[in-house]
Amino acid sequence: MPPTTSQHRRTHNLLLINKLLDQRDATSPFTLVLDSLEQSARPLIAEYVRRAKITGVHVFFVSSETLSKPLNVDVFVEAWNQTLQSWEKSLQNELRRLQRRRCLIVFDSLYQLCATPDSNNLPALLSSFIGPTTSLLAVYHTDIGRPSARTPLHQNVYAPSPLTLLRYLATTVCTVHSLHHVLERKTARDRSHIEPSFGLAEGKEGVLQSLGANGSEGVVLEMEHRRKSGRGIREWYYMPVVTYRDGPEGSGAKDRTAVMLLDDHPLYRTPEHDRAAEPSEADGTFELGLTAKQRQDRDGVVLPYFDAQTGGGEGGRILYDMGSEDDFDEEEDEI
């Protein structure tokens, strides 16, 4: 990739991920986060909530598996302790009260909503919360299968799965990966080996998590963003995990985490990538630069108009000393 194109891609995609994390200009009304046992979505959710606090966005946290109120959350809804109709009504009332203020609704898990018999109404339920000033952020655990025991007999067996509906409805789909596992897969690809599997994908009895799962150094984000025009943007990012102390002051809460492209990570990029990123002169079969001796000889040349300005020479005439290899021509050399 040419340096100009690579730099444009880097700048554009870094601006995009920061707009998504800051929830600016309603860039993504519905963001779906896919996680697994190998990498939890909690670091990404914490970054969303922390940036929302910085920009003054009112955060609602709908809890299905979180027992205590997370940091920087304004309203904590215990969905696990209420019926669907109860917490939905209370949440809608709060949204009407804050209809002129920017709001972010976070679902820590969609499993309970997907497990209900009327899970086909899930898109309608989530869409009812989205508005001009309200965005939705929801987590879906890909390692948990949909239970079939609660499925009624009259339900259409050809209906799409809840995950398919969520992928279709979401404007941004973000899949989190473990940095250790991504590096292991890249090493295997570089050596033309089969990429390794981790966790439940290994198919080994008793293995739930592999080494390197939920690393504390950072999270790899696989993002797919869809614009209003329908054009999709796919990119891989690396987001370092930063732990802040509790408290509004002196905790670094106003500092944004520096997200980078995965290609720019020192452990991921290759020497070939570094050479391709370096600006080079025009391609050719010959050297266009000058050696040190050639530069010295060029600086020592005195041009005729410089000689005339200093009063030397013969009034600006061009003087030429013939060499032994020059051919004298009486007609052309009379001038």
Image (cartoon, rainbow, N blue to C red):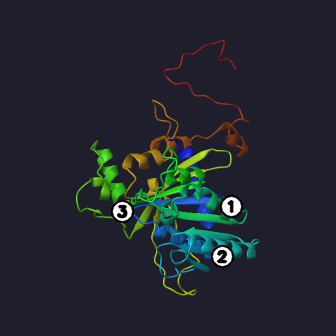
Specify whether residue 35 is in view.
yes
Which is nearer the N-term, disc 2 or disc 1? 1
Could you tell me how far apart the alpha carbons at marks 3 and 2 are, in whole angstroms?
Answer: 34 Å
| Residue 205 percent location from the top left of the image | 22, 59
- Marks 1 and 3 sit apart, C-alpha to C-alpha, by 31 Å
Distance (Cα) linking label 2 and label 1: 24 Å
Q: Which of the image's four quarters has the C terminus?
A: top right
Q: Residue 296 in the image: x percent, y percent?
A: 50, 45
Q: Nearer the viewer, mark 3 or mark 2?
A: 2
SS of the residue under disc 2 = helix
Q: Position of residue 46 (x, y in %)?
A: 51, 72
> Where does residue 274 sit, x and y in percent of width and height?
42, 50
Which mark, residue 38?
3
Say few, some or many: other residues with alpha carbon within 10 Å of mark 3 (under 14 / 14 to 19 / 20 or more): many
Q: What residue is shown with label 2?
A: 90
Q: Is residue 136 above or below residue 311?
A: below
Near mark 2 (Cα within 10 A), the count class, few <14, some 14-19 or many ≥20, is few
For mark 1, give the secondary structure. Answer: helix
Reading the image, the residue beneath label 1 is: 26
Residue, x 70% and y 32% (percent of image)? 317
Instruction: Select label 2 or label 1 by which is in front.
Output: 2
Q: Earlier in the sequence, mark 3 or mark 2?
A: 3
**Front residue of this view, candidates 82 and 249:** 82
Callout count:
3
Kind of residue indicated by mark 3: Glu
The vertical placement of 36 against 335, above or below, is below
